[in-house]
Amino acid sequence: MDIKRRQFLTLSGLSLLSLAAAVSCTPSQQESSSGSAPTVRLGFSAWPGWFPWQVAYDEGIFKANNVTVDLKWFDGYLESINALTAQQIDANSQTLNDTISSVSGGAEQVIVLVNDNSTGNDKIIVRSGINAIADLKGKKVAAEEGTVDHFLLLLGLEKEGLTQKDIEFVPLETGKAATAFVAGQVDAVGVFAPFTTQALKRPGSKELFSSKDFPGAISDHLVFTRKFVDAHPSLVQAMVDSWFATLDHIQANRDKAYKIMSTKAGVTVDEYKDYADGTKIFTVEENLKAFQPGSERTSLQFAASEIGKFLVEVGLASQTPDTSKLFDDRFVKAYAEKTNK
């Protein structure tokens, strides 16, 4: 199953310079002299909550909403993050965690839509003999440092009054972390699908907890550059409208839609359906609720504050990022109003 995963962005000054140079050679996205609207360059990569974009493209849903889209597939999720940061694309499909990481580095980005929440596809898997989070104390636990699964691990520890100092944290790239766990080199591992399947091949291993236990902790979004939102709000609205129209289309044409999505994912339809079970696609109503202030991670504003603290704790940000201008729910609200949802 060729599903590559979301990962935090940590750009070096050199990579930023090289990206800037690349962008300088890219044609401007300004409206042409004829007054026609520009093409929206949308990036996405392998995650169940983002494959509906392929359905929107293949089934002509973008065109039906009067927006021309250059749908750009990225084999590596990190590449899509880099492209948005460098404004080589206008919008991208990415996690709340990564968006805040980019903002902390100076990027001006806006979240206009919640695609989904991870509801089980990110897991902490343990060897036999470990039956509770408290049992992790003093144990070797591997995860890729700075990723959403590292974040999930810290949330689980916090729930039991523990911190990373109470375990022996082993920072490893996700694939290597799964391999080390199967080889018996560590006692537990934080991984995402499909590495969850690999990790569970260790005899006696089991899931200790997952993203399902922490609603809202790992959310995925449609993120635009602020420059594009300011210049072309009508096109942003068309993209949000297209997303919800696509979800309706999938419901009405499930077999064809699942065929499109599974083909893009490089898996069978049945495998895709199993994988998608760990992803909760958000409705219009759930979007509206998520944008509201709250005291739980189901509120994007609260979740952002928690993620900001995490970034500082693991050294990916020198100070808590300013997320006061990160969320813009006017497009979801406008869609809800005109469809009476």
Image (cartoon, helix red, strand yellow):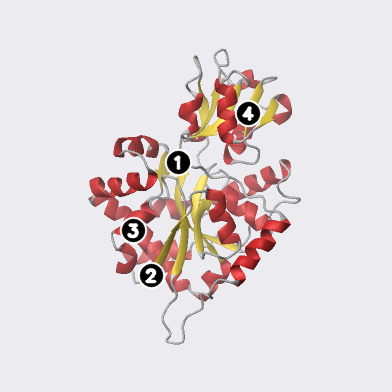
Which residue appears at 45% of the width and 41% of the height? 3
**Percent position (x, y) of residue 199?**
51, 25
Mark 3 → mark 4, Cα distance in angstroms: 38 Å
Q: How far apart are marks 2 and 4 (CA)?
A: 44 Å
> Is 104 in front, or is 204?
204
Residue 244 coordinates in the image, percent (x, y) = 35, 57
Q: Which of marks 4 and 1 is nearer the N terminus?
A: 1
Badge 3 crowding class, 10 Å Cα cut-off, few under 14, some 14 to 19, many 20 or more, is: many
Q: Is mark 3 in CB contact (under 8 Å) with mark 2?
A: no
Which residue position holds label 2?
68
Q: Which residue is labeled 1 in the image?
A: 3
Q: Which of marks 3 and 4 is nearer the N terminus?
A: 3
The location of residue 218, given as percent across then percent down, is: 53, 43
When the figure is inspected, residue 21 is found, relative to residue 215, above or below; the finding is below
Which image quarter: residue 225? bottom right
- Circle 2: element type: loop
Above or below: residue 191 compared with residue 313 = above
For residue 251, side relative to residue 2 (left or right): left
**In the rendered structure, are the residues bearing label 1 and label 2 in contact, judged by CB atoms less than 8 Å apart?**
no
- Amino acid type at circle 3 is Ala
Contact check, label 4 and label 1, Cβ < 8 Å = no
**Labelled pair 1, 3 in contact (Cβ < 8 Å):** no
For the point 75% across and 51% down, the residue is 319
The CA span between labels 4 and 1 is 20 Å
Q: Which amino acid does label 2 sit on?
A: Thr
Q: Residue 56 carries which label?
A: 3
**Residue 163 visible in the shown view:** no
Q: Mark 2 or mark 4, which has the lower sequence index?
A: 2
- Which quadrant does the C terminus fall into? bottom left
Under circle 1, the secondary element is: loop
On the image, numbered disc 4 is attached to which residue?
Answer: 142
